[in-house]
Image (spheres, rainbow, N blue to C red):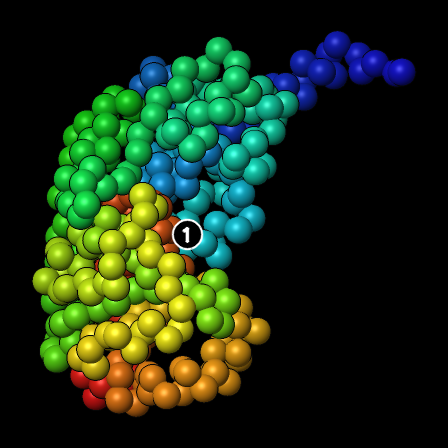
Amino acid sequence: MTCLPVITVLALTTVLTACHRPVTEQENVQNGNTKNDNANSARINIASPDWGNAATLTAMGYPPIATGDIRVWDRWVGTPQLPASTVDVGIRYQPNAELIAQLPVDMVVDNFFYEHARNLYGDVPAESVMFTAKGESATWADYSEPTRQLGKLIDEPKLAEDYIVKSQKDIQLAGERLQQRYPNVNKFAVVQFADANNMRMYVANSLFQPALTQMQKELVTLGKGNSFGFVPIRMGDLAQLDEDICLLIIDPLSPITRAEIEDSLIWQRLSYGNNRCVGELPPVWIYGGMSSLVGLANNLATVELEGGAAL
């Protein structure tokens, strides 16, 4: 086996480290600004396999230097967009240990779902931050308090507090825009299709509850969900919803599943888009944090609703 010269290995390590400096530090170097070196050296480099934490940190203006599955981020998370400097460390559930070892990570922010992988980060400390309902119904505090926790971990409590205040204003403004566009639509049921006949209906302990509450709208469900905030239902179960309830379908929705839904006799008899209101929303990370609430509200403010009370 041929070994690389020591100087080559050292050079490669230096390049990898330099390429993944925090965004603000990279900008200062590029602009020839070195007076803030002390401040930048104190910046805590975060890696997070959890998209909810990664997205909320990014929306706060403090993106992680690494997260996982970036290749499908747009398909499942949508907004905010990760900076180009954020490194993809592979599968979130089992990140690439060799790549992580090359990055200047100061802290890992995850939750119980990823704790099994903490040994891959070596001696890097890990902190758990979880956006989830504490009771049967999710509240604003279930999302604002973990955001404050993130602010403390990065030593930027004011950044987190300002982001919470701005998020609440943005969501309420989105509610006003929705009300102006569709004044007769006040109740929503939210689903995501697994296939043409099976779907998840999101319930009171999901992020849709606090988002719609802040928008002065009502979330309607068909029963109590599981710990992940949804109840599995079938197409025919939608007939139990009153006709004044607007159905929101969360993307992604594959072309094949879409075609099968449109061909379904049950769907046709339900008359969504005619007698019943329906709308389709861009992706939002269902298990996300404050940024998911804001993204959902903004999507809902611009959604095109068809049928029923939307007419």
Image location (x, y in percent) of residue 137: 18, 48
Residue appearing at x 25%, y 64% in the figure: 222
Residue 132 in the image, given as x and y percentages of width and height: 27, 40
Q: Mark 1 points at which residue?
A: 77
x 46%, y 34%: residue = 49
Question: Is 292 drawn above or below residue 175 in the view shown?
Answer: above
Point out the residue furthest to the right here. Answer: 1
| Foreground of the two, 215 or 261 | 261
Give the answer, above or below, for where 170 lies relative to 303.
above
Which quarter shows the N terminus? top right
Residue 24, position as x, y percentages in the image: 38, 31
Give the left or right position of residue 56, taking residue 74 as reference.
left
- Which amino acid does the dot numbered 1 rest on? Val
Residue 25, horizontal then vertical, whole percent: 41, 27
Q: Can residue 206 be seen in this view?
A: yes
Element under label 1?
A: loop
